[in-house]
Amino acid sequence: MKNAFVIVTLSSILAACAVAPKQQAEQQAPTPASSDTQAATEGAKAPDGEEVATSEEDEEAKAKAEAEARLPKVEMTSTMLNQLLKAEFAFRKGDWQGPYLTMLSLAQQTRDPRLARRAAEMAVTARQADDTLAAVRLWRQLDPTSDEATQYFVGMVVTSDNIADVEPVFVERLQKSPPDKRGVLLFQIQQLLGRAKDKEAASAMLERVIAPYNGTFEAHIVRAQAALARGDREAAQRAAHAALVAKPDSEIAVLMMAQVLEDDGKAGPMLEAFLKTHPDAREVRAAHARVLVNQKQYAQARAQFETLLKGRPDDAGNLYALGVLASQMNDAQGAEGYFTRFVEVLGRNPEDERDPTRALLILAQIAEERRDYPAALGWLEKIPAGTEPQLLFSAQLRRAQLLARQGDLAGGRKLLASLKPAEPAQQAQVAVAESQLLRDAGRALEAYSLMEAAARRFPKNPDLLYDFALLAEKIGRVDVMEKALRDVMVLAPDNHHAYNALGYSLAERNTRLQEAYTLVAKALEMAPGDPFIMDSMGWVQYRLGKLDEAEKYLRDAYALRRDPEIAVHLGEVLFQKGQQAAAQALWREASAKDPQNDTLRSTLARLRQSL
């Protein structure tokens, strides 16, 4: 038997049986290697995620040929072949230890690193960290020039109890790395050591590894990252400042400084100033936009994201951010446009792993609000089957509601009956959804009976009790309503909706107004930016006769949310203040949005007004 034939036979056996360690680890067990490991051992990725080329295709082919040439010339005996096949068959049947020991033993006998690699794969599949590390150590020992073996070795050691063995690897790689690639490598080493169990030992090792490069811009950035990771914000700020001084025009430096400041009030002006002299710094602009979002400066944030979108019209991340901002600003048309483009972009790029479900749900809601029920159903039908179960469940509830609103109440109820969720919380959601269908169809008493039974079945579910309370009030059972809301307050003390609902109910019935004020004030303290709670406070103030305070709360609420009910309340306050024209304008606006609004109709009737 000639050696050439032996090598091909051994390679083909291993290739047929093996799964690459990374692939197998992703499928069955935590991988001993990672992209950071690869970068720390061969310089794979830059901090912004862009790949750094380490060789041309011909160089890779040459390296592969050299690796093949390094393999030992092993003669395949019938005994060895029998051992290999027996081990593989046993492994496929679920046994790992015997096959693992066989591969390890054969690797030691033949000095063939591929057998050690296969032993590592088996240990990874069996989730045996110590055995994996033993096999990887042998693999690297048999092929010390193998980058792949070194990657897995580093990945395993750095998450073990003793990380000392990786320090020489890092030192050697940094020494061999060209100066223009060394910064990337330093960054990846810091990221990798950040995963170590012994944080103190990892921190000390990082300092030793960095020491030869002290004073460099890259070392400052890495020190800032490491200090931030261990919670030493002062050290992080010193290092980030040093990096910014070293390279004041560096986008990375200004982003690092903004990150360590942890103060949007300071970071915002710094990012804005940088953009004035570096308008094409996309990452800085994105960071500035996020700061503006945190500060609730939505219009300014939207302008920044729109600038980013001009440069990359099909950037899915920016389209989604703009859709969210438009929704926050009550720009339904803008939100619909951005989310539609977002879904289209994902449809053209199947490799993009972003989930369109939330965007589709928002698009369905927008269509529903303008009473375009077929369009809303169309968006829901686009939700991928493999999406998150809870979102799929929510979509089914919405579909039932839309069917009923199109006049197919029986179809909506049939869909709800088909769901059969196992979780009690979801069972309660189905009951709430069905009661809403009946309520919208004008069958309030049936809805109440259904919810009364559900409340007995799920007495500890605050969401169901809250909806039951609102329904009880609708049919005049204010005693049941108040008890249910107080039960919610006990079960969920931080549920501001319960306090708001009871306070508003008291104000609406013009009774126990001081108690109403206390309840709504507590709700407003828990959710100060909620326009509906601001509306309730405005209505309480109106009932108390404080028209100026009422107008202020209601105007602020309407500025945040142009809801018909808030418009009706503000209109009544203005009407009582003698501003009839302004009141009529608000009521017409409310009527245009919701002609059948009960609050509008009862208000106009009570005040003897018409539009």
Image: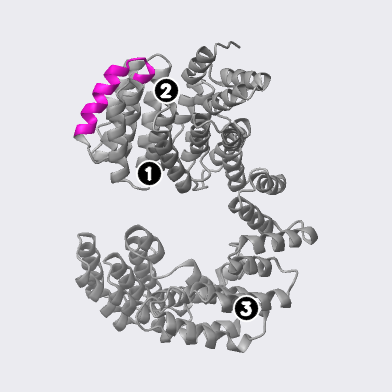
Task: Pick the residue in front: 365 or 349.
Answer: 365
Crowding around mark 3 (Cα neighbors within 10 Å: few <14, some 14 to 19, many 20+) is many
The amino acid type found where label 2 is placed reads: Leu
Query: In the image, is 581 to the left or to the right of 23?
Result: right
Q: Which residue is mark 1?
A: 495
Identify the amino acid type marked 1.
Answer: Asn
For label 2, the residue is 402
For the N terminus, the quadrant is bottom left
The answer to which of 79 and 523 lies nearer the viewer is: 523
Alpha-carbon neighbours of circle 2 within 10 Å: few (<14), some, or many (≥20)? Answer: many
Dot 3 amino acid type:
Ala
Where residue 538 appears, x then y in whole percent? Answer: 53, 34
Residue 239's disc number = 3
Residue at 39% x, 64% y is 20
Q: Disc 3 and disc 1: Cα gap in Å?
A: 44 Å
Magenta-colored span: 439-456
Answer whether residue 186 is visible to the viewer in this image.
no
